[in-house]
Amino acid sequence: MTYLTTITKKGQMTMPKKVRKILGIKIPSQLELEIDKKTGQLRVRKAPDIMDFAGRFKVKNPINAMKVRGLMEKHYERS
């Protein structure tokens, strides 16, 4: 399927609701953008959320996943 969107003067774009639904993107979310320099194609993926990993690993000294997420969001610098 192909969807059309517009890039604003600020470099922003609106992702159509159908695309967000297909990708399972909820607001707010982060996306991974991958560019194939040879073909000029852009690949968009939903970035993994730290909560997606909660409970998958066994550790000796467990840390509350919500606390880790809060710390990550507090100290994460966006480029």
Image (cartoon, grey):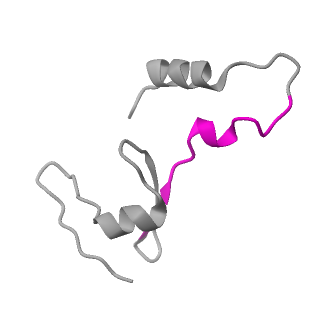
Percent position of residue 60, x then y: 88, 19
Quadrant in which residue 40 is drawn: bottom left
User: Which residue is depicted at the point 17% across and 66% down?
Assistant: 6
User: Which residue is depicted at the point 18% across and 61% down?
Assistant: 7
Q: Vertically, is 40 above or below 56?
A: below
Identify the magenta region: 42-58
Viewer-nearest residue: 35 or 18:
18
Q: Vertically, is 49 above or below 2?
A: above
Query: Is 24 inside the magenta-drawn segment?
Result: no
Q: Is residue 56 visible?
A: yes
Quadrant in which residue 22 is drawn: bottom left
Q: Vertically, is 29 above or below 3?
A: above
User: Which residue is depicted at the point 61% across and 22% down?
Assistant: 68
Report whether 9 appears left or right of 21.
left
Percent position of residue 28, x then y: 37, 41
Percent position of residue 52, x then y: 63, 43
Report whether 7 appears left or right of 40.
left
Query: Is 47 inside the magenta-drawn segment?
Result: yes
